[in-house]
């Protein structure tokens, strides 16, 4: 079983840009494609950016227990991580990187514990977040209001994550994210190697101890058959 990098943030904080950077820089990472009921944005591809599902189909998958986690982020707009998607990435021998909503991220972290590194990407301020969403020009005024309202709530979850990165200057945030992820993957690999080495040593000790006991029994048996009367 591989490792997980969970990237989460309020909408517009820059987590997707950071995830794309990590995928380019770290070969062992593979992207977990989330499922959603929202409509595709310009340039998004089904099966690559998201699995775009109807609300009816999404609900059927919920009923079948197909999701590792899911959430109704906005009324009628669902997001979730399919169990088969996690299996797919691990079957390829890769570590997973997620780009998911805050509550979904807390659920994945709760389920997988130390196998997952959960990173919260924080905007420098709510005002700057509003500015970024307006510059996107992909949201209506009402949609932006919804996202800002939700962002304020999501910011209260930041202490639930392993690392909080402030995305003020993107170039700096990219470097910091890469360092944190590389350290996590390296440390877990080194720890696994150490544990495996210690396990081999312990098995060797047990084998040697068992051999000594068998030798002693053979010697005792031999001595008992050569008694001089």
Image: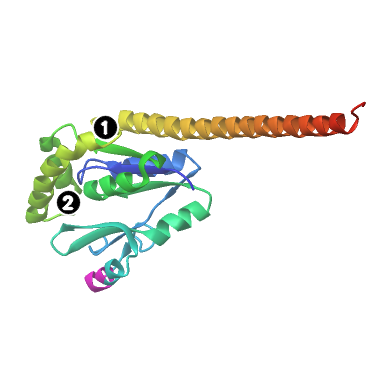
The magenta segment: 54-59
Residue 13 percent location from the top left of the image: 22, 40
Q: Secondary structure at mark 1?
A: strand
Q: CA distance from mark 2 to mark 1?
A: 27 Å
* Viewer-side label of 2, 1: 1
Query: Which sits earlier in the primary sequence, circle 2 or circle 1?
Result: 2
Work out which residue is located at the far front of the displayed protein and give it.
Answer: 229
Q: Quadrant of residue 80?
A: bottom left
In this rendering, the answer to whether 111 lies above or below 229 is: below
Binning the other alpha carbons within 10 Å of mark 1 as few (below 14), some (14 to 19) or many (20 upward) gives some
Residue found at the far top of this picture? 228
Where's residue 58, x and y in %?
27, 68
Q: Position of residue 74 (x, y in %)?
A: 15, 58
Work out whether residue 43 can be spotted. no
Instruction: Tell me which residue sits at (30%, 45%) in the image.
Output: 110
When asked about the image quadrant of residue 115, the answer is top left
Which residue is located at x 28 percent, y 49 percent?
107
Residue that numbered label 2 is attached to: 137
Task: Specify the quadrant of the image occupied by residue 77.
Answer: bottom left
Residue 97: numbered disc:
none
Q: Residue at x 8, y 46 (%)?
A: 149
- Name the main secondary structure of what is drawn in magenta: helix
User: The C terminus is located in which quarter?
Assistant: top right
Position of 81 with respect to 56 (left or right) is: right
Secondary structure at badge 2 equals loop
Q: Confirm whether the magenta stretch covers residue 166.
A: no
Q: Residue at x 53, y 49 (%)?
A: 93
Viewer-proximal residue among 158 and 29: 158
Examine the rendering and report whether any part of residue 104 can be seen: yes
Instruction: Please give the residue where the numbered disc 1 appears in the rendered image.
Output: 164
Percent of width and height locating residue 48: 39, 58
| Label 2: how many Cα within 10 Å (few below 14, some 14–19, many 20+) | few
């Amino acid at each position: 079983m591989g490792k997980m990098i969970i990237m989460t943030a309020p909408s517009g904080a820059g987590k997707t840009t950071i995830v794309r950077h990590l995928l380019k820089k770290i070969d062992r990472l593979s992207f977990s494609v989330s499922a959603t009921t929202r409509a595709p944005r310009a340039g998004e591809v089904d099966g690559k950016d998201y699995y775009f599902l109807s609300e009816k189909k999404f609900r059927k998958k919920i009923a079948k227990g197909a999701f590792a986690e899911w959430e109704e982020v906005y009324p009628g707009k669902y997001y979730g991580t399919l169990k088969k998607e996690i299996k797919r990435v691990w079957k390829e021998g890769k570590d997973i990187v997620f780009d998911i909503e805050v509550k979904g991220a807390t659920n994945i972290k709760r389920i997988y514990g130390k196998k997952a590194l959960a990173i919260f990407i924080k905007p420098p301020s709510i005002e700057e977040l509003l500015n970024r969403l307006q510059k996107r020009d992909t949201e209506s005024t009402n949609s932006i209001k919804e996202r800002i309202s939700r962002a304020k709530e999501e910011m209260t979850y930041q202490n639930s994550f392993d690392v909080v990165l402030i995305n003020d200057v993107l170039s700096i945030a990219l470097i910091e994210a890469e360092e944190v992820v590389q350290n996590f993957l390296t440390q877990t690999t080194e720890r696994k190697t150490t544990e495996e080495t210690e396990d081999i040593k312990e098995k060797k000790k047990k084998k040697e101890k068992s051999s000594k006991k068998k030798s002693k029994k053979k010697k005792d048996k031999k001595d008992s058959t050569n008694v001089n009367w």
